[in-house]
């Protein structure tokens, strides 16, 4: 019997018996220029079926490819999609999961097919994106309704077993549902029944074309969290209209008509886990149809509690299943301690978040899971050359990942760490109030090291002599970096606290100046501000923390507004006993009083240590911060792939 009996109880959905209560969220990935899926896409979805999710939902798929808003996503009005759809759904179904697909029309968020750039929507006006909106008449409504039905039929031909209609997030159907966009006076406007009319017509159309044995789930925004938009009370009324007409009601949140919507749609690290559960709970109380909750769930015990207390019937996981596609299987078997936690850094989604990034990267990736986006190619890796002795120097995220992967590949592994704890740069992060998942990640990696036959040498400063004694075939240097101490007058005469180090928080004075507004400086400054210190962050460049994934950056800047003062384009000129002098872009000098100065101007690789080890073993690999100042993602990925190459 599982630790989580409710989470792993079966559930009837149309003709299917779902193996558990975990749905893999729609998370699209770019395919070919025509929008077809590739072998890489199929493998990306397959991994989540293999990991144990009951339903795997293919991401946004266009019911009308002329109404597309992002490129390269399954055009369901083009039979050319079928071979790739069949391959992908086969890959999902052969692992016992149900294959679903998200049906979407972008409406006023579409790329316009018209020379004047105008788009079609429920009511005339100007879109949030500055485009002219032409009001859809009945003549335009009918083809859209048909397009949804035809798309579902195409999907079914492609082996899809159920669908998720996208009725939230500000796409076409939520434009009809929401008073933000629907100002009509006819039978499609006004009351909630009228605004939902097009959705009901679509549901009927899909039923006619796909039959009762093709379950329909509808994704809604429980609350649009936008002025003038749908509030929970109205979504509850909408759910009553949908009750019994669809097979599942899926409750997400927010709308793209708000520039900060992404912080809620892909809940940021500054929101509590399960921040949308109360929305699902309110809807569940009003309907008989099963209700699904989504948003920031990554802990099976939490999921069990949500289901057990009757707040929802099923949970949907997005990023948590990128971080660890095997989350369901690990939880079912009682190995939940080995789940790699999603740390909500939002790297996965930010890299495709146009217009904030100039072009979407179009490939999937995850900071804490090197496999994501490389599921296909990683099938072809094989152990070559038999068992080797692998020595890893440095127990940070890169070093630990290298040791774990090398051990899993059957090599003899020795991991050396000069300190008393494994974790490296991850350790400093764990004291920050919004990084509980980074702490979990560190613990998971440490447990993985301990559970493997890895010889651990703690408190060991590795010198060429130590390497020669051990005599490894492969030496992996993961010795990290050290803080840069800039050449600012007065800096040597005053005690400084170095960011990203294990300093004593109680020793930090009331007034704090952070020199350097990169990601580390901003996060540390935020944390100290949260602890009640008066924090000023000084950054030389125009933009603070430019290296942060866009959505994390957005959340961070919003939080900083509450807890700290951030000044950009200011250059620190000297440091004194009382504080810091800095000049702004006009050349004006100002004094910033500081009880504590936190230095966060970056890191430099420990090149000397690396070079001292270079010729000590037949094969030598340099990974992470000691190669170049690296992110946790780069360190873990380098660790993984360096070991995969042995
Ligand atoms: C990489 C990525 C791609 C996504 N693509 C889609 C999509 O195609 N359609 C959609 O409705 N939501 C999409 N989402 C949102 C997720 O379905 C989910 O609602 C959101 O990530 C919140 O759940 P989570 O906190 O479990 O990640 C995407 C999210 C991510 C991280």
Image: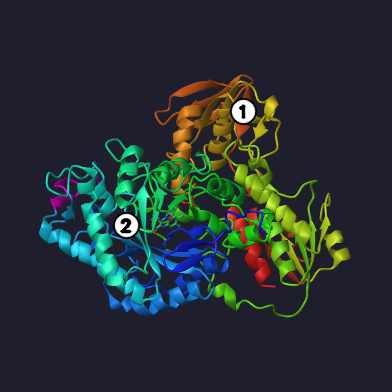
Q: Residue at x 53, y 59 (%)?
A: 322
Q: Residue at x 63, y 67 (%)?
A: 641
Q: Is residue 340 above or below residue 29?
A: above
Q: Quadrant of residue 75?
A: bottom left
x, y (%) of residue 632? 60, 52
Q: Nearer the viewer, residue 281 or 412?
A: 281
Q: Quadrant of the N terminus?
A: bottom right
x, y (%) of residue 456? 82, 57
| Quadrant hosting ligand 1 | bottom left
Q: Is residue 128 part of the magenta span, yes or no?
A: yes
| Residue range highlighted in magenta | 123-135
The alpha-carbon separation of the residues under discs 1 and 2 comes to 61 Å
Q: Residue at x 34, y 49 (%)?
A: 169
Between disc 1 and disc 2, the foreground one is 2
Q: Identify residue for label 1.
A: 597
Q: Quadrant of the C terminus?
A: bottom right
Mark 2 residue element: loop
Q: Is residue 204 part of the magenta span, yes or no?
A: no
Where residue 245 is drawn, which disc sits there? 2
């Amino acid at each position: 019997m599982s630790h989580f009996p409710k989470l792993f109880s079966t559930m009837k959905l149309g003709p299917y018996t779902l193996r558990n209560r975990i749905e893999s969220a729609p998370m699209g990935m770019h395919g070919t220029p025509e929008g077809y899926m590739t072998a890489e896409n199929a493998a990306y979805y397959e991994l989540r079926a293999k990991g144990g999710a009951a339903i795997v939902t293919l991401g946004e798929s266009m019911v009308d490819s002329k109404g597309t808003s992002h490129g390269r996503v399954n055009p369901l009005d083009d039979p050319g999609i079928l071979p790739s759809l069949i391959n992908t759904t086969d890959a999902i179904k052969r692992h016992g999961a149900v294959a679903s697909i998200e049906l979407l029309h972008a409406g006023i968020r579409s790329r316009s097919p018209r020379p004047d750039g105008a788009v079609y929507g429920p009511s005339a006006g100007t879109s949030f994106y500055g485009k002219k909106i032409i009001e859809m008449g009945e003549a335009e409504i009918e083809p859209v309704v048909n397009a949804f039905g035809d798309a579902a039929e195409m999907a079914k031909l492609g082996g899809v077993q159920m669908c998720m209609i996208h009725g939230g997030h500000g796409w076409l159907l939520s434009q009809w549902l929401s008073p933000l966009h629907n100002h009509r006076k006819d039978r499609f406007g006004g009351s909630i029944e009228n605004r939902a009319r097009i959705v009901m017509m679509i549901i009927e159309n899909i039923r006619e074309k796909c039959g009762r044995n093709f379950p329909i789930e509808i994704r809604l925004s429980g609350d649009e969290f936008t002025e003038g938009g749908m509030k929970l009370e109205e979504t509850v009324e909408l759910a009553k209209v949908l009750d019994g007409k669809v097979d599942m009601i899926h409750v997400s949140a927010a709308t793209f008509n708000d520039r900060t919507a992404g912080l809620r749609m892909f809940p940021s690290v500054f929101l509590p886990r399960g921040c949308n559960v109360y929305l699902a709970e309110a809807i569940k109380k009003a309907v008989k149809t099963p209700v699904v909750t989504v948003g920031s769930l990554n802990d099976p015990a939490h999921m069990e509690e949500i289901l057990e207390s009757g707040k929802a019937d099923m949970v949907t996981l997005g990023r948590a299943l990128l971080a660890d596609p095997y989350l369901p299987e690990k939880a079912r078997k009682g190995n939940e301690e080995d789940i790699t936690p999603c740390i909500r850094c939002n790297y996965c989604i930010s890299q495709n978040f146009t217009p904030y990034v100039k072009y979407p990267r179009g490939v999937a990736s995850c900071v804490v899971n090197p496999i994501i986006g490389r599921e296909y190619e990683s099938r072809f890796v094989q152990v070559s050359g038999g068992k080797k002795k692998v020595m890893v120097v440095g127990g940070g995220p890169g070093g630990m990942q290298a040791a774990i992967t090398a051990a899993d590949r059957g090599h003899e592994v020795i991991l050396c760490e000069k300190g008393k704890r494994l974790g490296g740069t991850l350790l400093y992060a764990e004291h920050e109030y919004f990084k509980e998942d980074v702490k979990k990640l560190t613990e998971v990696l440490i447990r993985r090291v301990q559970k493997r036959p890895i010889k651990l040498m703690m408190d060991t400063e590795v010198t060429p002599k130590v390497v020669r004694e051990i005599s490894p075939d492969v030496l992996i240097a993961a010795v990290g970096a050290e803080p840069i101490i800039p050449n600012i007058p007065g800096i040597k005469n005053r005690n400084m606290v170095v960011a990203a180090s294990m300093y004593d928080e109680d020793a930090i004075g009331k007034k704090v100046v952070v020199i350097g507004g990169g990601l580390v400086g901003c996060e540390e400054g935020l944390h100290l501000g949260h602890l009640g210190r008066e924090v000023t962050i000084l950054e030389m460049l125009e933009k603070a923390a430019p290296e942060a994934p866009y959505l994390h950056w957005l959340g961070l800047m919003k939080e900083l507004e509450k807890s700290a003062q951030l000044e950009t384009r200011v250059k620190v000129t000297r440091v004194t006993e009382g504080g810091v002098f800095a000049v702004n872009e006009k050349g004006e000098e100002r004094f910033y009083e500081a009880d504590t100065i936190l230095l966060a101007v970056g890191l430099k690789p420990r090149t000397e240590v690396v070079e001292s080890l270079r010729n000590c073993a037949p094969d030598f690999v340099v990974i992470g911060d000691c190669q170049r100042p690296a992110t946790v993602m780069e360190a873990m990925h380098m660790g993984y792939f360096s070991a995969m190459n042995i």
